Amino acid sequence: MPLRAGERAGLDDPYQVLGVPRSATAEDIRKAYREFAKRWHPDTNPDKPEAEARFKAISAAHALLSDPERRARFDRGEIDASGAERAPPGGPGGWREWAESSEGARYRSRGFDFGEHAGPSGFEGEDFEDLLSRAFGAGARRAGPRRGADIQLGLRIPFLDAVRGATRELVLQDGRRLSVSIPKGAEDGLVLRLPGQGMPGRGEGAQPGDAFAVIEVEPHPLFRREGRDILIDLPVTLKEAILGARIEVPTIEGPVAMTIPPWSAEGTRLRLRGRGVDGGHQFVVLKVVLPQGPDPALETFLRGWAPRDGSDPRAGMRAP
Amino acid sequence: MIGIEELASRIPELPRAEIPLWIERRWLRAERGPEGAWHFTEVDIARVRLLVELRVTLEVTEEAMPLVLSLLDQLYDARRTVRALLEAVEEQPAEIQQAVLAAARQKA
């Protein structure tokens, strides 16, 4: 066990000078001081030449320990028995100057293993290159060959290529042609990494950078996409909407036949199961279109028609 | 560069018996000359003074030394890094210096 600061110094230690334990109360210290001061007063010890030094030491020890603030600082090792600030290890003029010079890198920290108390990340030393590359990316690394820069490219693809997946050719600025495989169901903004297709690296054995293709999906005149579902607006005639019909609907995989049930209103969503992207569905939204008029037969019919449902469709819209 | 004899004469309090331990634990990173004797450069001598201060003057135990040294070394690593960055900033044109300082102040 190391001795605590102050204890090792023998007669320099004010506690030893006064012969009191470190736990002594202010009263203990005051009593001890009185007793020692009396015993070692130079006037009462003319035959002892060391008495004057002892008396001075006793006075100094008392001065230090009777001041609670200074006593506490001494106990913490911040000041020595004379009350002087204790220099931190390696202070000015010593290790610090060397440690902060470039030669100091020889004593670079290797971290300290706290054993079972170590956190998940441990307590690792971090060297300058680590720090720079963390701050500025891998490109900041100075040592060794330098990896080429990454490049970013826009890739505009038709809606159906994005939905179904496709292979497209991409022409780089330097004239290189790359074949890019677009995964099925690619969405707008998807970034495809093309490893090693970026700028060439510098230095021997340097890795080239990567190319990143940012997918931009062109809108389709018929289809829209909501996640894995495909939506399509399907115009139907008044007759089809009321009487029902079997009609052909375009899907992303080609036209399919579909039944419109009788009395399908405007905006009805009909589902074509499994016709979306990757297990999604296609929803068909009906748009009822009137026949291109004039149609005197229809008009005549409607004039003579008394609807069974006589309710007002705007009943809920009356202003309060 | 000096050998262990001169090191001991320069630092009288040096506990010579501990030197092999210090080197083995990499507290002291001295190098061996071609004839097998330890060579101490100026930075190694300063390091020895630090180790003497810790082990002899402050009586840091062998067990506590790795922790104390690790903390000290990390502190100086950080200070070296900051110094290098500041020197690099100083070499930049004034407007870049201002931009870096302004950004650093915002983050501090």
Image (cartoon, rainbow, N blue to C red):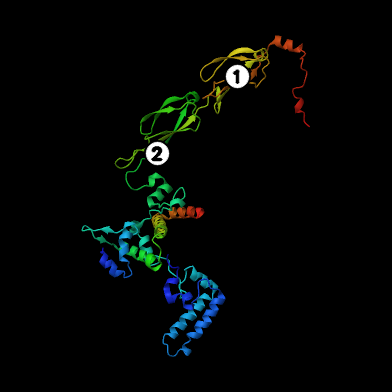
Q: Around disc 1, counting alpha carbons within 10 Å, would you say few (fewer than 14), some (14 to 19), or many (20 or more)?
A: some
Mark positioned earlier in the residue sequence (1 or 2) = 2
Is B31 on the left or on the right of A73, as rendered?
left
Using the image, name the chain to which the residue with label 1 belongs. Answer: A
Q: Is residue B28 visible?
A: no
Question: Badges 1 and 2: C-beta atoms under 8 Å apart?
Answer: no
Q: At x 66% / y 20%, what residue is drawn?
A: A266
Residue where numbered disc 2 is placed: A150
Would you identify the image quadrant in which residue A306 lies?
Answer: top right
Indicate the amino acid at tag 1. Leu
Looking at the image, residue A110 lies above or below residue B55: above
User: Helix, strand or loop at disc 1?
Assistant: strand
The residue wearing badge 1 is A234
Q: Classify residue A93 by image quadrant.
A: bottom left
Q: Tag 2, which secondary structure?
A: loop
Quadrant including the N terminus of chain B: bottom left
